[in-house]
Amino acid sequence: MHVAPVGGTAVQDHVALAEIELCGELIIAASAAREERLSLESIDEVLRVAKERDISAGE
């Protein structure tokens, strides 16, 4: 975990920023969904999980 020094500039935690972006994408998808809950497939699609699996499998 990165902590901003007192009186200095803030240090960006790139992992945390990526997680926040993904959470935002899930919130947008959930608010736009017609069904009450997002399916697991929809969540995987929003988080691009299948794409990452395909890339990993190809290595």
Image (cartoon, grey):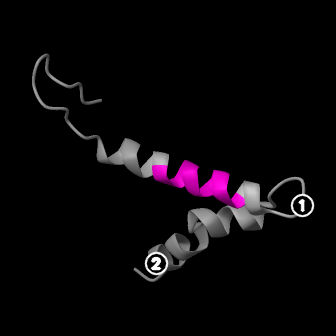
Q: Secondary structure at mark 2?
A: helix
What residue does disc 1 label? Answer: 35
In this picture, which residue range is highlighted in magenta? 21-29
| Upstream in sequence: badge 2 or badge 1 | 1
* Residue 19 percent coordinates (x, y): 47, 47
- Residue 9: % across, % down: 13, 31
Label disc, if present, on residue 57 of the rendered structure: none
* Looking at the image, residue 44 lies above or below residue 21: below
- Label of residue 55 in the image: 2
Name the residue located 56 percent from the left edge and 51 percent from the top edge. Answer: 24
Pinpoint residue 33: horizontal percent, then vertical percent: 80, 62
Which amino acid, by three-letter code, is at mark 1?
Glu
Say above or below: 44 vs 37: below
Residue 17, x across and y down, in percent: 38, 46
Q: Residue at x 56, y 48 (%)?
A: 23
Rate crowding at label 1 as few (under 14), some (14 to 19) or many (20 or more) other CA atoms within 10 Å: few
Q: Residues within 10 Å of mark 2 (few under 14, many from 20)?
A: few
